[in-house]
Image (cartoon, grey):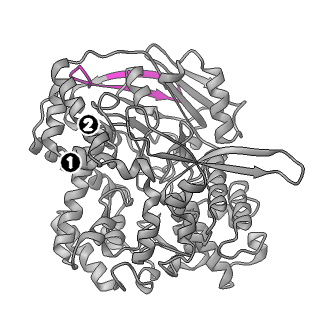
Amino acid sequence: MLGRNYIKVLYIDLTTRKIKIERREDLMEYIGGSGVAMKLFSELVKIDQDPLDPDQPIIFAIGPMNTIFPVVTKTAAVFRSPLTGNLGESHAGGRLAMAMRFSGYDAVVITGRASSPVYIAITEGSVDIKEAGFIWGERVERTGKVLRDRETHIGSGKRSIIRIGKAGEKMIRFAGVNVDTYRHFGRLGLGAVFGSKRLKAIVIGGNRSYPILKPKEYNKVYNKIHKIATESGAMKKYHEIGTPINVVPLNEAGGLPTKNLTQTKFELANEIDGVSFAEDLLLRKLSCSGCPTGCIHIGLLRIEYGPGYKTKFTGVGYDYELIFALGSMIGVGDKKGVLRLIDAVEEYGLDAMSTGVILAWITEMFKKGLLTEDQLGLKVDFGDTEAYLEIIANIVKRPNTFYRDVGMGLAKLAEKYGGKDFAMVLGKHEMTGYHTGYGAMIGQSVGARHSHLDNAGYALDQTMDKLDKREMVRKLIEEEIDRCMLTSLHICLFARKIYGDKELVCEALDSIGIKATPKSLTDMGEKVWRLKNEMKKKMGFDFRELRFPKRFFETKSLNGILDTDTAKEIVDIYVKEGGL
């Protein structure tokens, strides 16, 4: 990929312990990242088998610009989601993309199931499958520490450690994968797929170097991009306060989901806003490798074990989505409470957003008398941090049938226990932190991975003067195709305004020997988008079966009350205009 005309793919079969390396020239048309991972997924997924079947693949892929250009920091993970049964795609930063680059592999494919818990150690000269019984059952932080001490032959500055917690080991369908402590493949259950393969962790790194084909041109375009990233203001908000800066504006506009979306204004929003976190608890800021921004905000959490006992100080990463899910959505309005809940889901290896939305549903079910104290093992009300910590622990411990069912995710939970009207899922995926209008609701529903990041529909709600259904559909499709291009190059979406200049992207690619035009990049993005939708259909997804919980139409959004007929009409237009 970088400095060569093929994609180097490492295949690891955990059942047979066989290792294979392929150099695939045919994958170059997909450039890297999401595109290459999707193509490999289309070749390897087992359509008729369960998402947790050993033969299902996990695919990681990076792009040609990773590490060597500013803010090109992400790695794609593509798998079959055990939460939705359909396409699973997640993106993470940290050091993983850099470590894959130095290991020499553009993509890593993992299949099979080990006979006992293992972790994989990958460098440019070796691939080892090692026993992991001694860390099976360990929490995420402890697992990282043990492997850092153990795998010292891979230089710490060029190494990445990704791992699961107890939630992944128990195949809880919304378990995530932790990446280098503060980043995650959070959504859609990759952690459960790791658990199904008895794969606790991957340690990857190396020292490989790459010649730059046109160093003079490379330096010129690198400096141009770096200057925009650091001096133009394009990344300013991400560095200063970070995404939590959005809490108060969304709340004032009436778009902040609160208390299971029974309201969109939270009376304690100012207490959990980014400014408040920065003033009271901000410990430090971090960057992913290859990024000059420093958007990862770490808050200081002080936990007392009891009067007269030791006190634990720890750093906990926070951002807007976590504050929504484990703050406003469940009525928790104090910063320490939010950090304690984030710390808990981090240590178990759960997806914070899915967990928060499920906690909100559980609370409303209990208040309505549809769940009992016997089932929950306690009483719960919105804002009750202590109860939520106990419920989170029980989700992982699974002491009874109810908690075992919670592990299947909210869509299946509501099918069995009721409360579908206020089980806040879209495309079987727990909602994200926006009730801004049709853009947010439809955007997540029709997006390839049912994420707000597929097409940023929530942003359309805040920029369109009035609802124009066809114009909204056109922009949703156009944005998702552009994002498929960006995530194939694996540019962080925070930098989309910088790399949205396709001439600039072409100039950067040319400096490393890859010829592209703005049109060819758009064509590639559309090709990846269509491949995703094609694979989704094969796995059983049908736009006609999309359902919206009634609550979305009861609670006033940033753009007023929504109605079901309009939502269905927009989906119909989307399917027709997209040729889907």
The numbered dot on residue 221 is none
Identified by mark 1, the residue type is Gly
Q: Is residue 156 above or below residue 175?
A: above
Q: The disc labelled 2 sits on which kind of residue? A: Lys
Residue pointed to by mark 1: 500
Q: Is residue 323 above or below residue 380?
A: above
Q: In the rendered image, which quarter is residue 405 located in?
A: bottom right
Callout 2 secondary element: helix
- Give the residue at x 41% y 36%: 60
Q: Residue at x 50, y 45 (%)?
A: 184
Callout 1: 10 Å neighbours few (<14), some, many (20+)?
some
Q: Quadrant of residue 229?
A: top left
Identify which residue, 508 or 335, lies in the foreground.
Answer: 335
Front residue of 311/349: it is: 311
Query: Which segment did they paint magenta?
Result: 1-22
Check disc 2 and report the residue beneath it.
227
Q: Is residue 304 visible?
A: yes
In the image, taking residue 33 as reference, residue 26 lies left or right, namely: left
Q: Secondary structure at mark 1?
A: loop
Q: Nearer the viewer, residue 502 or 266?
A: 266
Is 458 in the magenta?
no
